[in-house]
Image (cartoon, rainbow, N blue to C red):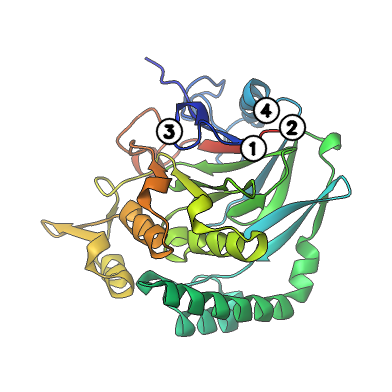
Amino acid sequence: MQKDFFTSQNSKLFCNTGLHFVLTNRYHGVSNTPYNSLNLAYHVGDNLESVKKNRAYIMQKYYENKTLLYLNQIHSNTIFTIRENRGILESTPLWVGAGFGVHFNKKLDSVTKYHVEQSKVSNIESKKDISCLRTQYDKILESSRHSLNETTKKHENTLLPNQCDEILIGDGDGLICDSPRVVLMSMVADCNPILVYAKSQNVFAVLHAGRLGVCSKILTHALLLFMRDYGVKTQDICIFIGASIRKCCYEIDKNLALQLIQEFGEKYVVCEDNRYKFDMIGLLCDEIESFGISLSQVEIYPSCSCCDESYFSYRRENVTGRFALFASLFE
């Protein structure tokens, strides 16, 4: 039996808000095996026309006459903001960097080193810590803007939604927007698709957060940007985390387990019979609570993408498609 999509209408947190989202699964599309059937990613080897038809199905069903924005997802914590300026949508990278903890972006060593030395987000325990982090974040952002001036110029885009129905923004893993004219998408096959929404400011973010994104605190960066640039208060925030691989299936090797234990503590790594498993959801929940956001403001979809064959899973299938989280503001 084919499972229906999970939408904001099914959500206890989002059903009466100004935002609509849909979490797809692998059904209701046209792609052939092993991408059967609703694969939404171009880069996995599927027939491109099939992917276009699959995306068009979602857009016509839920978001007719809107423009789809998406990213070339690179397991980073790079976040773009989408703003409307005199009727024209513009995108600028708000955050570019490898961030906290595990270090991946060699081009930003100076920024990353400063960031890691000055703040350990995984150890935030109080509002004082968050305030200190915000000050450090401002310094880091100013430094990164200066050192990446030329890079930022290259990434600036002018978006003309009326000319096409989908736009690739660039390389990154997060989009923030306050315009109802567009739809944001995050594609996954075990990574966490995350939606952040501030009701009072009517601004939202869609994030792609696998292990690298979770460990480099892409969610923290998005929350800081909400607070810094939109004046969002923690009590106004709602968060949705879609289907993803859970600790029941996310087995990692010993070296990585020891690295994660050193960085974040033993709480998020389970060892059974010399087999190590990583709890991304547990780490995300503690990260959220460190901001003073109650878990009553968070909705976590119960399915493990590796266990539940309704979803694509890279861990289970290796060659496979991607399901997605789509979100847009009501006009």
Q: Is residue 271 left or right of residue 3?
A: left
The label shown at residue 12 is: 3
Q: Are the two marked residues, 2 and 4, in contact with CB atoms closer than 8 angstroms?
A: yes
Question: Can residue 76 be seen in this snapshot?
Answer: no
User: What residue is rendered at 41% in x and 21% in y?
Assistant: 3
Closer to us: 242 or 250: 242
State how far apart marks 3 and 4 are (Cα): 21 Å
Question: Can residue 226 be seen in this snapshot?
Answer: yes
Q: Secondary structure at mark 1?
A: strand
Q: Is residue 100 left or right of residue 317?
A: right
x, y percentage for residue 109? 56, 81
Q: Amino acid at mark 1?
A: Ser
* Pointer 3 local density, CA inside 10 Å: few below 14, some 14–19, many at least 20: few
Q: Are the two marked residues, 1 and 4, in contact with CB atoms closer than 8 angstroms?
A: yes
- Residue identifier under label 1: 328
- Residue identifier under label 4: 63
State how far apart marks 1 and 4 are (Cα): 8 Å
Q: Earlier in the sequence, mark 1 or mark 3?
A: 3
Q: Secondary structure at mark 3?
A: loop
- Residue identifier under label 2: 66
